[in-house]
């Protein structure tokens, strides 16, 4: 077998993110796609998915050794809302007090 049969599909040398759509509009994405959507490094996504690293980890589930994220799920939306609200809360506290 050639090595091309075992490599990830790519466009111009970049890995194509794997996305699966569920019937309820939730997408199953990998850490690379999650990082691209949030415009952060993939390593940050992986670290912030670990309960041992943060008090509010990114909701994640495992498929074997692979981390997967449910984009559009109530848990992910709640996590994103908490992350968006924290900076605005800090700004309010600074301007009021």
Image: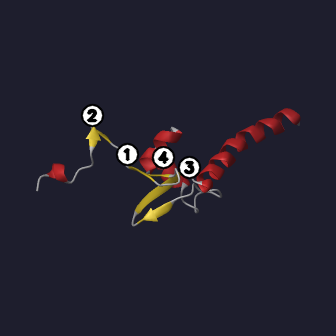
Which residue bears the numbered disc 1?
Answer: 17
Q: Residue furthest right?
A: 97
| Distance Cα–Cα, label 2 vs label 3 | 29 Å
The Cα–Cα distance between marks 4 and 3, rounded to whole angstroms, is: 11 Å
Distance between the alpha carbons at the discs numbered 4 and 1: 9 Å
Q: Along the polypeptide, which appears first: circle 4 or circle 1?
A: 1
- Where residue 7 sits: x, y (%)? 23, 50
- Measure the alpha-carbon separation of dots 1 and 3: 17 Å
Disc 1 and disc 3 in contact, CB within 8 angstroms: no
Q: Position of residue 57 (x, y in %)?
A: 59, 56
**For mark 2, what is the residue?**
12
| Between 35 and 51, the one nearer to me in the picture | 35
Sequence-wise, the earlier of marks 2 and 4 is 2
Quick one: label 4, few (<14), some, or many (20+) residues within 10 Å?
Answer: many
Mark 2 residue element: loop
Kindly identify the residue that appears in the image at 51 percent across and 37 percent down: 39
> Of circles 4 and 3, which is in front?
3
For marks 2 and 1, give the CA distance.
13 Å
Q: Looking at this rendering, what residue extends furthest in the bottom direction?
A: 64
| Secondary structure of the residue carrying numbered label 1 | loop
Per the image, label 4 sits on a secondary structure element best described as: helix
Which mark is drawn over residue 60?
none
Does the CB distance between marks 2 and 3 fall below 8 Å?
no
Marks counted in the figure total 4
Q: State yes or no: discs 2 and 4 in contact (Cβ < 8 Å).
A: no
Residue at image coords 45%, 58%: 67
Q: Which residue is the site of mark 3?
A: 72
Q: Is residue 93 visible?
A: yes
In terms of sequence position, does the residue under pointer 2 or pointer 1 come before the other? 2
Tag 4 residue: 34
Give percent across and percent down for residue 43.
Answer: 46, 48
């Amino acid at each position: 077998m050639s090595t091309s049969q075992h490599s990830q599909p790519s466009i111009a040398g970049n890995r194509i993110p794997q996305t699966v759509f569920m019937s309820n509009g939730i997408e199953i994405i990998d850490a690379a796609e999650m990082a691209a959507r949030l415009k952060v490094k993939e390593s940050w996504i992986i670290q912030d998915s670990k309960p041992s690293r943060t008090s509010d980890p990114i909701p994640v589930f495992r498929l074997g050794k692979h981390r997967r994220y449910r984009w559009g799920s109530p848990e992910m939306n709640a996590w994103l809302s908490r992350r968006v609200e924290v900076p605005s809360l800090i700004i309010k506290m600074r301007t009021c007090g």
